Amino acid sequence: MTDGDGFPYFIDAVSRRSGLPTEQAAALARAVLQTMAERVTGGAPDDLVGHLPNNVGGYLTGPAPVDGGAGAAPPPPPDAGPAEFLRRVEQRAGVDPAAARAGTGAVFATLREAMTVREFREMVARLPRDDGGRPGPL
């Protein structure tokens, strides 16, 4: 899954896991990765980028506009948890909350498959926590 043509495979895996159509899975994958890029603490998740298909890793290099390109999203508050993460994914992808949750879970599961256990744990450790101490949006 790390070759330059791996994006379709990544999206197919997200679609299969979420049960959503390919086009919607692609929009959700982009939204999740863009939201992760703005939420991960300690800078851009460089370790993650090296383990993704080239076209996928590009979505992690920095924040992107939330509203379809009309303007940049304000940065999330430092204590924003999983609900805010899912809200941003929902807004970016233009989907309902159930699709945002299904797509987010599918993207994280697909990322887990594309990385070593150590790399995945390190990435998850850099996400903000919710009130129960769980990394958001997992």
Image: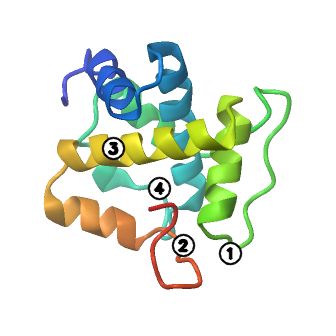
| Residue 127 visible in the shown view | yes
Circle on res. 128: 2
Q: Which residue is mark 3?
A: 49
What whole-number distance in Å separates the C-alpha atoms at marks 3 and 2?
Answer: 19 Å
Q: Which residue is mark 4?
A: 44
Q: Earlier in the sequence, mark 2 or mark 1?
A: 1
Query: Are circles 2 and 1 on residues that touch, CB within 8 Å?
Result: yes
Q: Tell me the mark number nearer the camera, choosing from 2 and 4.
A: 2
Q: Tell me the mark number nearer the camera, choosing from 1 and 3.
A: 1
What whole-number distance in Å separates the C-alpha atoms at marks 2 and 4?
Answer: 14 Å
**Secondary structure category for the residue under label 1:** loop
| Residue 61 visible in the shown view | no
- Write the residue at 29% across / 68% down: 122
Q: Earlier in the sequence, mark 4 or mark 1?
A: 4
Q: Earlier in the sequence, mark 3 or mark 4?
A: 4
What whole-number distance in Å separates the C-alpha atoms at marks 1 and 3?
Answer: 23 Å
Q: Is residue 9 left or right of residue 44?
A: left
- Write the residue at 79% across / 47% down: 73
Residues 31 and 53: in front is 31
In this rendering, is residue 83 above or below 9?
below
Q: Which residue is mark 1?
A: 78
In this rendering, is residue 133 above or below 121?
below
Q: Tell me the mark number nearer the camera, choosing from 3 and 2.
A: 2
Return the x and y of residue 14 as percentages of the image width and height.
36, 30
Circle on res. 92: none
- Residue type marked 3: Val
